[in-house]
Amino acid sequence: MLPRERAEKILTLHAAGWPVQAIADHIGHSHQTVRDYISGLRTPGIRTPRSSLLTEPLARYCRQRLAEDPHLRTSALFKEVADLGFQGSRATLYRELTRRHRLPVLADRQDTNSKEEGPQIPSGASRTLARRPERTPVLPQRVAPITGETLNSYLARIAHANHLTVTEVLAALPTWFSTKTNNIDDRAQHHMFAPAATQALHELAHLTSTTPAGLAHALPAFGTDESPARATTACHQCTARLGIRQPVPVHLPIHHKVCTRHGIWLSDLGEPHLDLSICPEITTAQHRANRLLRHCTPQQLTLAHQTAVEAVPPWPASPAAVPHHWRYRLLALQTHNHQRGIPTNFDTYTHAAIYPDAIGLAAAVLAKHPADPARSTGENSPHLRAAAPAVQGHFAIQDSLSQVRATASGTTR
């Protein structure tokens, strides 16, 4: 930005009839700068705002990722949006989210991550943990890990099955495990952890009478899979088959919303799972999402799905379309799961009900621009407008449960 006096002088000389070439030579600035002030693209004394590198679709993607994974590391989030086409630096991403999109929680995550990345062994525990047997013992009760299970959860289940405390289990393992379990996110792969990870994996396999390959595949703490993940709990029917009654915290792929074996909606942390047997099309949509990954990345699918949700019509166009609309599905899910004792006031119901419509729209969008979902899923995308035209009138502004029930029964006002 030029000083106000110099910028105003450009306008004065232009008003006096000076050509651009003469003004540029006299002021000592480029022709383009002179033309910008003359044409009004720049205003004296006002700094030209920077164009945002973080588009609104990418910003929504970040909001969703931060909401569904409470301990998502900012370095991991930056890698995800960079794979989606974000051209700025990591510092630019932090600045865009905290200033422009008002996500101050990201700054706290940045500070937390910087502390988490270094080894953290609680004071007074390192000496105790160092005095471990030369040979790791073998526990009598074998405990199989759940896919995506957190290390803290797995060690707690090992201790409970063998009538031990977690401290006693850690005492029989390398200090690598104590360091990992004292970090909020055990997926963080610090460079100091990597050399000891292989030995730690084999020690745990020996202790639990399991295979190293099985543990490495199931537990994200060993860092064999760096793909984006969401925090949730394992399907309660899958764990019940193994005799596990308590919730098991896991990290699953970001596109994995449904347990297709049992038809269970895997909600975010803090919200109950939903039985989808009343709406099998939601499970079918998960199968379709899995097939889409043959032609796109999980990040591209998540971005397309997240933006498609915004474009799905909020109300059916006519009473005849009600049985095929997501609000009819919403009421069915609420009624069916309320009989199981689950309250109807969770956002999870809406996320599940709209899923088939959103996946269908996301598939159409990705078919047009599979390599550039940020562009193809923008607010003004012609593909979104064509696939999901906006519904006008009183349907678009009324959003109460009574209206849902009235619409589902075909008695709209």
Image (spheres, helix red, strand yellow):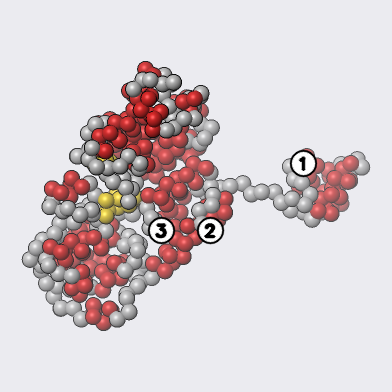
The dot on residue 40 is: 1
State how far apart marks 3 and 2 are (Cα): 14 Å
413 lies above or below 138: above
**Quick check: marks 3 and 2 in contact, CB under 8 Å?**
no
The dot on residue 28 is: none
Quarter where residue 291 is shown:
top left
Q: What's the amino acid at mark 2?
A: Ala
**In the figure, is residue 262 to the left or right of 301?**
left
Res 3 visible: yes
The dot on residue 73 is: 3
206 lies above or below 36: below
Q: What's the amino acid at mark 3?
A: Arg
Res 369 visible: no
Helix, strand or loop under label 1? loop
Query: Total of numbered circles in the picture?
Result: 3
| Residue shown at 15% from the left, 64% from the top | 160
Quadrant placement of the C terminus: top left
Q: Earlier in the sequence, mark 1 or mark 3?
A: 1
Residue furthest to the top in view is 320
| Residue shown at 28% from the left, 33% from the top | 335
Q: What's the amino acid at mark 1?
A: Gly
* 36 or 305, nearer to the observer: 305
